[in-house]
Amino acid sequence: MAASPLDTSRPDRLIAAQALSRAAGAPLLTGNAVELLIDAAVHYQRWLAAIRHARQRVLLENYIIRDDSVGRAFRDALVERALGGVFVAVVCDWVGCLGQSGAAFWKPLRDAGGQVRVFNRPQLGKPFGWISRDHRKVLVVDGELGFLSGVCISEKWLGDPSRGVAPWRDTGVALRGPAVAEVEAAFARSWAGTGAPLPRWPAAVPQEPPGKVALRVIATEPSTAGLYRLDQQIAAMARKTLWLTDAYFVGVAPYVQALAAAARDGVDVRLLVPGSSDIPMVAGMSRSGYRPLLKAGVRVFEWNGSMIHAKTAVADGIWARVGSSNLNVASWLGNREIDVAVEDEGFARQLAEQYEIDLGNATEIVLAPRRRIRGERVQRSGDDPAVRLRRAVRRPRGGNGSSGRAAASALRLANTVGAVLTDRRVLGDTDTSPLVVGTVVLAVIAVIAALWPAVIAWPLALLAAWFALNLAVRAWRTRQAHRERRQDDEDES
């Protein structure tokens, strides 16, 4: 059996546990029960059942709550509980819900006595304040049952069977035990950041622990970087395996280097990302970072379904992470996020088994075989049919005409057929795609500026006016604060 990081009888394990606690900024909580939840349909069923059985309070925090059949089902369940005397509090994000749900959608809940707050609307005096978002997906019921996940409240997560669109692949957990109080405390901080604090409820009566799972609740807030430090630590500490799933991977250099170093050291590092994304620009940025990972030995897979939105990690079969945080700067440094880092072999085994199931619906990305100089034959890469198909198609010299285009089409077909046969696809020239897009965008802007300068000038003027107004408000507030402090000092003297 693999040594557990909880075994503090060994000095190295004691140091590891201490390092993880300090990196995450979160204590290790024992005595929890953790249930793995897969995909939105299961989440919605469990979330709605928990809301409908609430006796005292329901606390819901989610990045997107959409005015559709799913969103209305949740709102109606909350209305029913509010009418029954249950305290209902909802935090949704301004950007996430922009165009998705508004005041009219929430009016029935507010009329029933429920409270709804919108996180971080644009404010005068904070010109860049809107960048920080509440990206959490949290539900806490009666202080006893908690959920956190990557799942938003929207029909989109269920797919569209009428058009053959599969449900989104996502992951979350249900929690009982001391961890629930930590999740509720994280919600309370979000709530207090948007207005008056939550009321105080009597402390829960101590009971027998519902489980034996040890975990950390990592409630990231802007500029805290707790999860970033933890992810770096796990990449450095993994000895055998590190399997990652991420929806919007945009690896920063230090983290990419950490993964690459682990792979070069013999760790089986794998990264599963969407093959097609709901944010194509992010998918392009993600692909542009594949090459250094692949060169270091990290295995990269793209999901073949409609969208994989899960954010998970499992290392050495003893440590696992599930939550709302993506592997990018926005999640690590800018947003409010929440994850659990579970130190339990049983749960880690469950997540690893699910990871292997997911790889059954994914295509591995591989580097193209290296060519020798002066047109010598391609170096052998085993009996990989994808490589053989690619090798069989040669681009003729002077391939700018129809024969060159035909050869290019045949090459793409060979790669596609090879991917179907082997679940592998050769990495294309992804590094140039963002550069080409950037070139085209800047060229279009230059043409517009030359021919119709007002089209560019007016937005710039409005932007400058917006920042000038914000800076003026900020200066006035700062001046007022100085005056108040000076007056307080004079009163004290």
Image (spheres, rainbow, N blue to C red):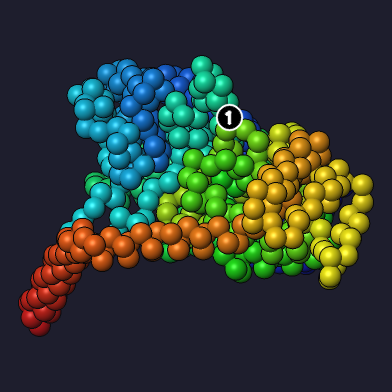
* Residue type, mark 1 in image: Asp
Q: Is residue 191 left or right of residue 136?
A: left
Q: Mark 1 Cα within 10 Å, few/some/many (few <14, many 20+)?
A: many
Position of residue 238 measured from the top left corner of the image (x, y, whole percent): 75, 59
296 in relation to 306, above or below: below
Q: Residue at x 52, y 20 (%)?
A: 163
38 in relation to 309, above or below: above
Disc 1, SS: loop
Pick whichever, 465 or 316, lies toward us: 465
**Residue 413 makes an appearance in the image:** yes
Q: Residue at x 35, y 59 (%)?
A: 444
Q: Residue at x 39, y 37 (%)?
A: 64
Q: Is residue 332 left or right of residue 398?
A: left
Q: Residue at x 52, y 25 (%)?
A: 159
Pick whichever, 215 or 255, lies toward us: 255
**Residue 10 makes an appearance in the image:** no
Position of residue 199 measured from the top left corner of the image (x, y, whole percent): 30, 40
Q: Name the residue tied to disc 1.
A: 39
Q: Is residue 284 left or right of residue 195?
A: right
Locate the C terminus by quadrant. Answer: bottom left
